[in-house]
Image (cartoon, grey):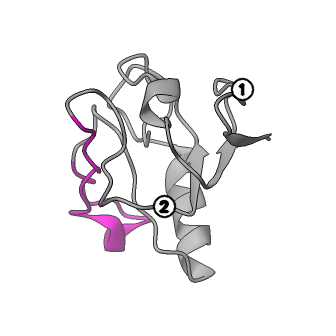
Amino acid sequence: GLAYKAGVDDMREAPALEIWAELGARGAAVRYLDPLIPEVPRTRKHPALAGCRSVELTEDGRLREEDRFDAVVVVTNHPQVNLQRCLEGFQGVVVDTRNCVKPENGLRVFKS
């Protein structure tokens, strides 16, 4: 999620935007999942991110097959998203900054 804390739609002081900008500066194509912030509003510090839209999950709460990712960084753990379900079948690396993803079903989880 992009919000500064779980369960809210407030992006002020959100570290996710800084992480996104840093990854992008290093050549990564970055997308995000946040049911509470479906579209990034214009911000003074990150105007280039304005209008980016959240990826959508399947009806059963998983990442869509067409949305393929090499890595997932969990910055905000919204209670509305079942991360274990969302990541079922995911083959990439998970960087978990919230200690909320269990390394089960073959998930490669790195806590940070």
**On the image, numbered disc 2 is attached to which residue?**
69
**Magenta-span inclusion, residue 52:** yes
Task: Tell me: 107 left or right of 46.
Answer: right
Q: Nearer the viewer, mark 2 or mark 1?
A: 2
Mark 2 burial class by Cα count in 10 Å: few <14, some 14-19, many 20+: some
Q: Which residues are magenta?
A: 39-58
**On the image, numbered disc 1 is attached to which residue?**
99
Question: What residue do we see at 24% from left, 56% from top?
Answer: 53
Distance between mark 2 and mark 1 Cα atoms? 20 Å
Task: Tell me: 98 left or right of 59.
Answer: right
**Magenta-span inclusion, residue 30:** no
Looking at the magenta stretch, what is its main secondary structure? Answer: loop
Question: What residue do we see at 29% from left, 50% from top?
Answer: 55
SS class, disc 1: loop
Question: What residue do we see at 22% from left, 51% from top?
Answer: 39
Q: Amino acid at mark 1?
A: Asn
Task: Tell me: 52 left or right of 33.
Answer: left
What is the quadrant of residue 23 in the picture?
Answer: bottom right
What is the quadrant of residue 2 in the picture?
Answer: top left
> Is residue 87 depicted above or below 21 in this figure?
above
SS class, disc 2: loop
The residue nearer to you, when weighing 12 against 81, is 81
The residue nearer to you, when weighing 17 against 109, is 109
The reply to whether dot 2 and dot 1 touch (C-beta < 8 Å) is no
Mark 1 burial class by Cα count in 10 Å: few <14, some 14-19, many 20+: some
Q: Quadrant of the N terminus?
A: top left
